Amino acid sequence: MSPPLRIGLAGLGTVGAGVVRLLEANAALVASRAGRAIAVSAVSARDRSRERGVDLAAFAWEDDAGRLATRADVDVVVELVGGADGPALTLARETLSAGRPLVTANKAMLAHHGLELASLSDETGASLRFEAAVAGGIPVIKGLREGAAANHLASVHGILNGTCNYILTRMAAEGLEFADVLEDAQRLGFAEADPSFDIDGIDAAHKLAILASLAFGARPDFPAVAVEGIRGVALVDIREAARLGHEIRLVGRAQRLGDALAQSVTPCLVPRPHPLAAVVGPLNAVVAEGDFVGRLTFTGRGAGAGPTASAVVADLIAIARGEAGPAFSMPAAQLAALPPAPAAARSGRFYIRLQVLDRPGVLADLTASLRDAGVSIESLVQPAPNPDGTALVVMVTHESAEPSVRGAVAAMARLEAVAGAPLLMPILPLEE
Ligand SMILES: NC(=O)c1ccc[n+]([C@@H]2O[C@H](COP(=O)([O-])OP(=O)(O)OC[C@H]3O[C@@H](n4cnc5c(N)ncnc54)[C@H](OP(=O)(O)O)[C@@H]3O)[C@@H](O)[C@H]2O)c1
């Protein structure tokens, strides 16, 4: 057997400790699949004295993670520190510049600096691999970069944040409001103490920018992702969606529209027969449409020590085998700078929910806002009024241009009889 592949591991938190555990538990299997042993040489974290539930005694310790990039006993650096910039980015740059392969789970860094790092990787010939950065344990990067490499992809969609999916599906299953489930999710460890990155859609947007780059041969462009989180989704929306035969999911959507790229993360109504509607709890899923392969659906656990370590070690096995190839499936210099699709190019059916004062003429004012914007209504429901004199109105539009619908909703929000902010959600077509 060849000499071991020697790892420099930066970050010993949830994922880093999981990698140490997996490499130890499955050492023989990993060695036979990789054709050589994979062994940690040196590690780095902030606090050397912290108990991590894994034995680090055999590994050298570096206070400065950056030194892993040039240590003589390291062949591959694994970056599991996190953060778009700071020490993770410094380590990534230094590692690739030194001609060493880099494995990372850091979606924020790739979404913001993916092009630069992929260019460095091309220049020095050092692999950049990031299976764990999108959808945790699901091999979706390998699936798109290799398995579907022969296809033009029409779209890639996904449930990319397990925290949001856990919250939305528990609201539906138990009839609970968003704030109650969030609090419980924090207590149970399914949501962070500061959950904003997850519930405001940023984490999913990082992953979408990476997927879109792979799928469409485009430069990762995080600022171009239109992002909306799930704070505005109420139990009543989940019930109304169910009445319409839909589930509510936070969906990342990327589509090529002509020469432009539409990227969004937003809560959507997903029709029950769509594969994303069946994804419950903290699971993730990605659906891609290829011109020859047809629809591909990847599902599994999108976070946690075990699934994420599984993806990191899969990348290490690929490197140990000598597998190469550009980070985003084509050389960085060939990745297109696709402009964001203009809002006018986006269209679809939409769900609109409003709280209104229950008095005559209100419905006429609402429908006039839609008429003035050229949006026609497929259905309108007004359930029984609330005891406080307000009433709910739920509308579904016909296929309409998104800016027209947004304009109509903005006009409705200005009506004196409309209480609180309206909620607007796209309805995902079954075939998308
Ligand atoms: N957790 C998941 O399920 C998951 C899933 C997919 C991707 N990811 C990604 O994986 C990465 C790691 O996530 P995680 O959940 O494992 O994070 P974490 O538990 O917070 O661990 C981060 C680790 O980085 C170390 N660290 C922080 N600053 C450092 C520095 N300047 N130099 C060296 N080490 C430093 C910390 O050291 P101390 O322990 O000493 O504080 C800690 O060990 C992130 O990019 C995350 O987005 C995580």
Image (cartoon, rainbow, N blue to C red):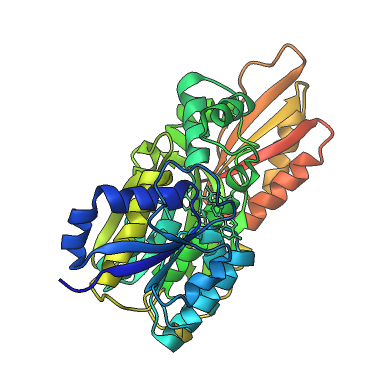
247 with respect to 390 (left or right)? left
The number of callouts visible is 0
Out of 341 and 336, give the one closest to the viewer. 336
Q: Quadrant of the N terminus?
A: bottom left
User: Residue 15, how many percent across, how many down?
Assistant: 44, 50
8 with respect to 275 (left or right)? right
Q: Quadrant of the C terminus?
A: bottom left
Asked which quadrant contains residue 178, the reply is: top right
User: With respect to residue 96, does 414 lie above or below?
Assistant: above
348 with respect to 311 (left or right)? right
User: Residue 220, how many percent across, how many down?
Assistant: 52, 70
User: Residue 374, how many percent across, how many down?
Assistant: 65, 52
Q: Residue furthest right?
A: 416
Q: Residue furthest front?
A: 57
User: With respect to residue 117, does 155 lie above or below?
Assistant: above
User: Residue 43, how many percent across, how many down?
Assistant: 46, 60
Residue plotted at (59% across, 55% down) = 46
Residue plotted at (53% across, 64% down) = 62
Asked which quadrant contains residue 40, the reply is: bottom left
Residue 112 at least partly seen = no
Out of 255 and 4, give the one closest to the viewer. 4
Asked which quadrant contains residue 281, the reply is: top left
Q: Residue furthest top?
A: 387
User: With respect to residue 353, does 198 lie above or below?
Assistant: below
Residue 59 at least partly seen = yes
Residue plotted at (32% across, 57% down) = 139
